[in-house]
């Protein structure tokens, strides 16, 4: 069955079953590698994206639940030549080690900064609390989010 979805500002027609997880469509049909398959249970955040401006776990959203809501993935934030301030801050602060959680961390931070452009450290930590990371770069991630907020305020 065909479904029309908007991802990173582009309209796509996808032939997939209505119950197919959005994550599979993003990765397999559209070739986007930002969202990762982590747990498949909405617990780790590796698959995070923005849907209608809200942070969602794409592993647990069926294609039929997308309903014309615009999807933004990590790839929709910036490019290698012109990275989004969060992407640049993650690079500058070396806030990625293995990189598996980076997608979820950046997308959660984007959702936070869209709602609160000048969050406190506690607000940043709260927004990132559900994003799992095994590498232990949490302090660098918090610094990166603060840096991005400061840069955006200039």
Image (spheres, grey):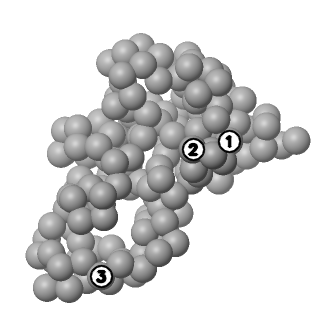
Q: Examine the rendered structure and indicate whether residue 85 appears above or below residue 96.
A: below
Say whether residue 119 is visible: no
Q: How many labels does the image show?
A: 3
Q: Earlier in the sequence, mark 2 or mark 1?
A: 2
Residue beneath the point at 47% across and 75% down? 10
Between the residue at mark 2 and the residue at mark 3, the CA separation in whole angstroms equals 26 Å
Mark 3, residue position: 13
Mark 1, residue position: 85
Residue beneath the point at 43% across and 69% down? 7
> Residue 130 vs residue 139: left or right?
left
Residue beneath the point at 58% across and 29% down? 90
> Residue 17 vs residue 94: left or right?
left
Residue beneath the point at 52% across and 72% down? 9
Q: In which quarter of the image is residue 24?
A: bottom left
Q: Examine the rendered structure and indicate whether residue 66 appears above or below residue 27.
A: below
Mark 2, residue position: 80
Q: Position of residue 130 (x, y in %)?
A: 39, 35
Q: What element carries label 1?
A: helix
């Amino acid at each position: 069955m065909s479904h029309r979805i908007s991802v990173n500002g582009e309209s796509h027609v996808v032939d997939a079953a209505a119950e197919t997880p959005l994550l599979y469509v993003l990765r397999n049909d559209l070739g986007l590698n930002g969202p990762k398959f982590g747990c498949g249970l909405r617990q780790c955040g590796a698959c995070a994206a923005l849907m209608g401006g809200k942070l969602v776990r794409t592993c647990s959203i069926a294609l039929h639940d997308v309903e014309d809501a615009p999807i933004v993935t990590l790839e929709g934030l910036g490019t290698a030549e012109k990275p989004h301030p969060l992407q640049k801050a993650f690079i500058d602060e070396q806030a990625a080690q293995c990189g598996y959680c980076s997608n979820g961390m950046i997308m959660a931070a984007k959702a936070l900064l869209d709602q609160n452009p000048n969050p406190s450290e506690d607000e940043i930590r709260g927004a990132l609390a559900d994003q799992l990371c095994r590498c232990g770069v949490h302090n660098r991630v918090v610094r990166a989010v603060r840096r991005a907020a400061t840069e955006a305020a200039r």
